[in-house]
């Protein structure tokens, strides 16, 4: 099941189009990461909020590095 | 996803091992399982669900049917285990293919037989396992880590209800007031829930960073951070209020719609009531007639009771008559004439006589003799009386027969009137109890509530805008001041990123929800036309409140004008639409699809169902669901047809392939 790349459904394509309309690339990246994490852990009893924090932190660090 | 085979062991009424081939071709995508009520159809449906969803389905069983999975352990197997002083194993294994890879999932439990206080044999669970295997191209069985993530990619648990369902439950979707369920179904299949969760988690992270920045900040920045935090909290609160108000507004709109629909369809009961009064009056008359005929019968019965003596009486009369004719009964001699002669003291020949003389004595003696003969006269009188009595009894018998017939007729009439009144009562019971005045007043109340909510929504919306303006001001200030406090600046950056991502996702969520609603609406329209071609005059709509509507050519609501069957097809059209929008194309497993479906649409539905999915597994009741019409349409499309046989004595089910 995870051996191959899954084809996007039409609704996923529509969602991708809506994502692509967000101008800020950093925000887009956070959103994509977070939605992926949500999908991966949708049935988890204790959702790992830490991963969401990390996704934000990763982008923030990159911004900070580029500013330096 | 494509189901290939189901294997069950000691599962409910299935004693021992049973296997059922579910594989089918694209030309014949249907698998049919026939079985009467209580034969084990739903058990097979449960077996598929348990195999796929394990513990999640066990929770469903408790919630929906108040049953524990341990209750499914087969009784005979449990007795065997007791006799052998061992354990019983129960399992369900589902073989399936997904994206060209073959898998099987096995759910198993072991139980120990124990006698409870009442001596009843019960299973106590001792072991529970779940195993997922991939069958590799070389034929090896590779064990995979089972968790629901696997199925979430294929058929998430919260979506499965729209693909594995029982006929009863699903038809509710087209009922008024089902908009919440319709909305949930769309949100689940297009993963809007994920986005909603993502918004929530990002907002939580933003809040954490905001509070940390507030704690870490000093001086003027601290003040700004404090105000900013408060403004953000207030904004969240206002948004929550706005959401609740919108929810309330939706509910009130649905209530108004349902009430208006009721009002529109409120039947005029006066005609029924009038007919009922007429019947009641007739019934009263019949009851009176019955009473009078019964009283008459009672009287007649006393006379008729003598009918047993009628024959001997007639015989006696005939006997007397014959004696009279023979002169055995002397003819009547006028006693009055003799008395007159004695009084006048003159004989009939003109001879006068005196009291005590010979003539007087002779006439007196004759009178005495006549008197002595009077018994014969009485017999003659009796003869006539007997004749009259016999006639009276005969007439009474005839009258009694006539009255009996009349009573029967009245009884029959009364029965007919009773039935007619009951029918009217039943018609009246089916009709809404509410009267127009009460309903109109309720609609008015709801409208007032709607206006009040709209006002509150406007106020909340204004406050949100005001709050957002304040936040923008604070953002500028905190950014400027934050440059001087590095740690706070870092926290501010993370808060900003998380909050902006959450806000952007919120907008995407709204747009995507609307987009998905339109997509489902379009497909439901198409599917409804396919399911019910006879209803082509109607247009299906899924409005912004997620209500499935049917409109006539003038745009008026016409859901109530659809037959029950057509309305049920609307639900099926919606299910098909969300299945197509999800593009998951899983097998469609329906337990008793035609059970509640009107026979007028059996033909259309059984024709269309095999076309909407690549694998259709149907559990049907013979005769009721598997009838001439459905068999004609489904049989040519079926790869397998199974019949369940149930041994009532041993409470065991066997599967026979037809």
Image (cartoon, coloured by chain):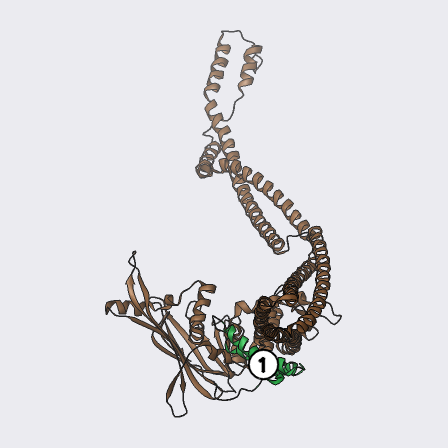
Task: Tell me what residue is drawn at x 72 percent, y 60 percent.
Answer: B459
The x and y percentages for residue A47 are 50, 72
Nearest to the observer: residue B239 or residue B456: B239
Specify the quadrant of the image occupied by residue B497: bottom right
Specify the quadrant of the image occupied by residue B471: bottom right
Q: Is residue B453 visible?
A: yes
Chain (brown): B
Specify the quadrant of the image occupied by residue A15: bottom right
Image check: B288 left or right of B148? right
The image shows a total of numbered marks equal to 1
Q: Is residue B572 visible?
A: no
User: Secondary structure under badge 1?
Assistant: helix
Residue at the limit of the structure toward the bottom, as seen here = B138
Residue at the limit of the structure toward the right, as seen here = B554
Nearest to the observer: residue A41 or residue B178: A41
Task: Tell me what residue is drawn at x 54 percent, y 16 percent.
Answer: B338
The residue wearing badge 1 is A59
The x and y percentages for residue B421 are 61, 51
The x and y percentages for residue B438 are 69, 51
Nearest to the observer: residue B537 or residue B232: B232
Image check: B328 left or right of B179? left
The x and y percentages for residue B452 are 72, 57
Task: Tell me what residue is drawn at x 61 percent, y 45 percent.
Answer: B283
Graded by Cα atoms within 10 Å as few (under 14), some (14 to 19) or many (20 or more), the crowding at tag 1 reads some
Q: Quadrant of the C terminus of chain B?
A: bottom left
Q: Colour of chain A?
A: green
Q: Is residue A19 placed above or below B128 in the rendered structure?
A: below
Q: Chain of mark 1?
A: A
Nearest to the observer: residue B548 or residue B148: B148
């Amino acid at each position: 099941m995870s051996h191959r790349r899954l084809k996007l459904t039409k609704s996923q394509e529509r969602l991708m189009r809506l994502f692509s309309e967000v101008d800020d690339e950093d925000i887009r990246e956070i959103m994509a990461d977070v939605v992926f994490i949500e999908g991966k852990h949708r049935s988890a009893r204790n959702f790992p909020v830490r991963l969401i924090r990390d996704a934000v932190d990763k982008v923030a660090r990159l911004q900070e590095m580029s500013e330096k | 996803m494509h189901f290939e085979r189901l294997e069950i062991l000691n599962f409910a009424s299935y004693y021992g091992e049973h296997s059922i081939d579910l594989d089918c071709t694209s030309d014949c995508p249907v698998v049919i399982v026939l079985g009467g009520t209580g034969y084990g159809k739903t058990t097979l449906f449960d077996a598929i669900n348990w195999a796929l969803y394990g513990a999640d389905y066990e929770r469903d069983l408790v919630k929906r049917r108040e049953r524990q999975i341990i209750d499914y352990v087969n009784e005979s197997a449990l007795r065997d285990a007791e006799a052998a002083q061992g354990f019983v194993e129960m399992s369900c294994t589902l073989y399936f293919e997904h994206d060209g890879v073959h898998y099987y999932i096995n759910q198993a439990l072991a139980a120990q037989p124990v006698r409870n206080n009442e001596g009843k044999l019960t299973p106590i669970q001792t072991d529970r396992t779940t195993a997922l295997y991939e069958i590799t191209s070389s034929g090896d069985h590779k064990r995979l880590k089972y968790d629901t993530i696997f199925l979430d990619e294929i058929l998430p648990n919260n979506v499965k209800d729209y693909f594995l369902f029982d006929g009863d439950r699903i038809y509710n979707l087209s009922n008024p007031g089902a908009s919440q369920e319709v909305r949930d179904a769309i949100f689940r299949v297009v993963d809007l829930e994920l986005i909603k969760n993502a918004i929530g988690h990002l907002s939580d992270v933003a809040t954490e960073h905001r509070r940390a920045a507030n704690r870490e900040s000093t001086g003027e920045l601290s003040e700004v951070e404090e105000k900013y935090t408060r403004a953000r909290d207030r904004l969240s609160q206002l948004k929550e209020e706005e959401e609740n108000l919108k929810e309330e507004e939706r509910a009130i709109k649905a209530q108004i719609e349902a009430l208006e629909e009721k009002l529109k369809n409120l039947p005029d009961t006066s005609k029924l009531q009038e007919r009922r009064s007429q019947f009641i009056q007739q019934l009263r008359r019949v009851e009176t007639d019955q009473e009078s005929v019964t009283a008459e019968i009672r009287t007649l019965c006393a006379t008729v009771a003598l009918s047993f003596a009628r024959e001997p009486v007639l015989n006696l009369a005939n006997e007397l008559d014959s004696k009279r004719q023979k002169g055995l009964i002397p003819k009547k001699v006028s006693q009055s004439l003799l008395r007159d002669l004695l009084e006048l003291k003159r004989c009939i020949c003109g001879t006068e006589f005196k009291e005590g003389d010979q003539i007087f004595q002779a006439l007196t003696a004759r009178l005495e003799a006549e008197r002595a003969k009077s018994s014969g006269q009485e017999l003659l009188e009796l003869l006539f009386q007997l004749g009259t009595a016999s006639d009276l009894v005969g007439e009474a018998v005839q009258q009694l027969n006539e009255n009996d017939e009349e009573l029967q007729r009245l009884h029959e009439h009364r029965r007919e009137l009773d039935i007619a009144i009951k029918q009217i009562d039943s018609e009246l019971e089916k009709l809404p109890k509410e009267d127009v005045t009460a309903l109109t007043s309720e609609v008015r109340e709801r409208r007032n509530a709607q206006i009040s909510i709209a006002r509150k929504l406007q106020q909340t919306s204004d406050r949100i805008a005001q709050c957002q303006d304040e936040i923008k001001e604070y953002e500028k200030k905190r950014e400027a001041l934050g440059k001087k406090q590095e740690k706070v600046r870092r926290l501010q950056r993370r808060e900003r990123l998380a909050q902006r991502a959450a806000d952007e996702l919120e907008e995407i969520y709204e747009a995507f929800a609307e987009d998905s609603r339109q997509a489902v609406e379009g497909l439901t329209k198409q599917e409804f036309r396919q399911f019910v071609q006879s209803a082509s005059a109607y247009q299906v709509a899924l409005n912004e409140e997620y209500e499935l509507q049917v409109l006539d050519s003038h745009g008026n609501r016409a859901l109530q004008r659809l037959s029950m069957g057509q309305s049920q097809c609307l639900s099926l059209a919606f299910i098909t639409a969300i299945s197509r929008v999800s593009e998951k194309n899983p097998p469609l497993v329906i337990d008793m699809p035609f059970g509640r479906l009107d026979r007028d649409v059996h033909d259309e539905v059984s024709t269309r169902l095999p076309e909407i999915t690549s694998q259709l597994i149907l559990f049907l009741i013979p005769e009721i669901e598997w009838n001439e019409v459905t068999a004609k349409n489904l049989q040519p499309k079926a790869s397998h047809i199974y019949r369940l046989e149930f041994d009532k004595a041993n409470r065991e089910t066997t599967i026979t392939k037809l």
